């Protein structure tokens, strides 16, 4: 039986696509091996969001070549898309596929095995206008399923290379999304995470359909779905129509990830982000009117070229006022080929790291404050895994719908199920919980998929 091993760098979308590529190999009779063991084919799904992403991708490619010099080494993903010649130049790389045409990967493997000639299958992604359908009926991770609904981005923020790696906005056919969501629920998943490169932009390339309509259809048509999570949504995409769908739904969770990037209007302008802090604050206020307990997490880049101490403090104060429940804080990192990398007044690394430290301290404090309002409440948690730090303790870790991480006593059978847990002690990064009961379904286990 031929064997294949995978290594995925980067974002949730890449992880989703690796699972989709594995489905193709599985159908062709391949056995999946651990990446650190010897395999006939290695597939490396690369990232290019930072220069470090490129470097890590090259290291992993070389590792595969060393492990089995006779294997077919296949490189795909964003770094392969933006720098195919650089990837082809690594001795031992056999096939390079970008962020399209992954469905043909087995044909390329067979072609290489016949002809023993390196294959560069990367095309101009900017000309692609159609979403590439790749089915993922199940995941290696048993607790939550991702569902990719769109590809590409039209924003061209000055720090970001991704439109060049992923192309322009393309939405997936809603019928396919509903069908796959039902398939995932039938396979036993309680939570589905909608994901994409610019997830909330779904439908902007369609005539009579939009993101709110998709959320409504998933909510109404997928039988047995318990939780629907949006991986990320821009403030400008949180329309009143979307808020209304969230208000009516009992499946869409009380958590939104809304990237801020900066709380200073002058920095936002240099980033070419298409909103002001005033607009952002207004959308958050509107959301909180409807959902007072909503968890709002965000991304912030500090030390963007030209960021002064005053601009940083604008961000710091904005974050504090808006009471985000958690932040992902990144020091600005130069990405070759983007306008920001060529901007004057690049910020000193020490200054960046000091600002990161200050913002993370604030984020930790806000996270504790957010969690503390749920102390004593009973929330629903999906246990994901044993507590790695203390595997003998009988404690498991999982997330509530509003994205609190909880440690509580559970058993292996409960992994992936919905469990009622009482929050005994709020904290960050973990809350301590006590097991109440498993939520059982009264609905039929499986719903026929319409073909």
Image: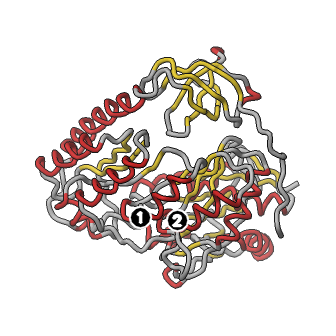
State the image coordinates of residue 28 (x, y, percent, origin top left). 84, 63
The reply, left or right, for residue 205 in relation to residue 147 is left
Front-lying residue, 131 or 214: 214
Residue marked by disc 1:
239
Residue at 45% x, 49% y is 256
Task: Measure how far apart labels 1 and 2 are at the Cα level.
Answer: 8 Å
Res 369 → quadrant: top left
State the image coordinates of residue 375 (x, y, percent, origin top left). 46, 22
Label 2: state its secondary structure: helix
The reply, left or right, for residue 426 in relation to residue 110 is left
Label 1: state its secondary structure: loop
State the image coordinates of residue 421 (x, y, percent, origin top left). 60, 25
Residue at 76% x, 69% y is 106
Residue at 33% x, 47% y is 330
Res 385 → quadrant: top right
Residue marked by disc 2:
212
Q: Quadrant of the C terminus?
A: bottom right
In the displayed structure, 446 sits above or below 397; it is below
Front-lying residue, 226 or 180: 226
Marks 1/2 in contact by CB < 8 Å: the verdict is: yes
Front-lying residue, 194 or 281: 281
Callout 2: 10 Å neighbours few (<14), some, many (20+)? many
In the displayed structure, 197 sits above or below 324; it is below
């Amino acid at each position: 039986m031929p064997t294949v091993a995978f290594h995925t760098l980067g974002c949730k979308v890449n992880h989703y696509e690796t699972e989709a590529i594995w489905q193709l190999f599985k159908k062709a009779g391949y056995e999946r091996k651990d990446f650190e063991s010897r395999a006939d084919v290695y597939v490396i799904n690369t990232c290019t969001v930072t220069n470090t992403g490129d470097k890590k991708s090259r290291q992993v490619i070389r590792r595969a070549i060393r492990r089995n010099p006779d294997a077919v080494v296949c490189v795909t993903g964003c770094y392969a898309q933006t720098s195919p010649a650089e990837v082809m130049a690594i001795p031992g790389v056999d096939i390079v596929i970008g962020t399209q045409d992954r469905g043909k990967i087995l044909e390329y493997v067979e072609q290489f095995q016949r002809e023993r000639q390196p294959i560069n299958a990367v095309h101009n992604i900017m000309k692609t206008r159609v979403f590439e359908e790749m089915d993922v009926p199940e995941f290696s991770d048993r607790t939550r399923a991702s569902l990719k609904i769109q590809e590409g981005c039209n924003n061209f923020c000055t720090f970001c290379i991704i439109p060049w790696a992923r192309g322009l906005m393309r939405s997936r056919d809603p019928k396919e999304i509903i069908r796959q969501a039902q398939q995932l629920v039938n396979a036993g998943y309680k939570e589905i995470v909608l994901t994409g490169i610019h997830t909330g932009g779904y439908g902007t390339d369609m005539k009579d359909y939009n993101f709110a309509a998709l959320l409504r259809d998933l909510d109404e048509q997928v039988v047995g779905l318990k939780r629907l999570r949006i991986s990320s949504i821009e403030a400008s995409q949180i329309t009143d129509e979307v808020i209304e769908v969230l208000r009516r739904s009992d499946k869409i969770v009380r958590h939104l990830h809304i990237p801020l990037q900066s709380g200073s209007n002058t920095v936002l302008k240099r980033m070419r982000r298409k909103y002001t802090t005033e607009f952002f604050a207004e959308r958050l206020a509107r959301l909180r009117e409807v959902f007072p307990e909503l968890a709002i997490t965000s991304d912030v880049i500090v030390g963007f070229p030209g960021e002064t101490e005053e601009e940083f403090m604008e961000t710091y104060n904005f974050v504090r006022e808006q009471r985000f429940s958690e932040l992902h804080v990144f020091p600005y990192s130069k990405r070759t080929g983007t306008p920001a990398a060529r901007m004057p007044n690049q910020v000193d690394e020490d200054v960046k790291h000091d600002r990161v430290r200050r913002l993370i301290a604030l984020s930790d404090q806000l996270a504790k404050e957010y969690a503390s309002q749920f102390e004593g409440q009973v929330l629903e948690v999906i246990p994901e895994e044993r507590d790695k730090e203390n595997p003998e303790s009988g404690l498991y870790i999982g997330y509530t719908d509003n994205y609190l991480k909880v440690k509580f006593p559970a058993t292996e059978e409960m992994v992936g199920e919905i469990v009622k847990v009482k929050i005994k002690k709020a904290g960050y990064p973990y809350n301590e919980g006590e097991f109440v009961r498993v939520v059982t379904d009264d609905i039929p286990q499986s719903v026929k998929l319409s073909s």
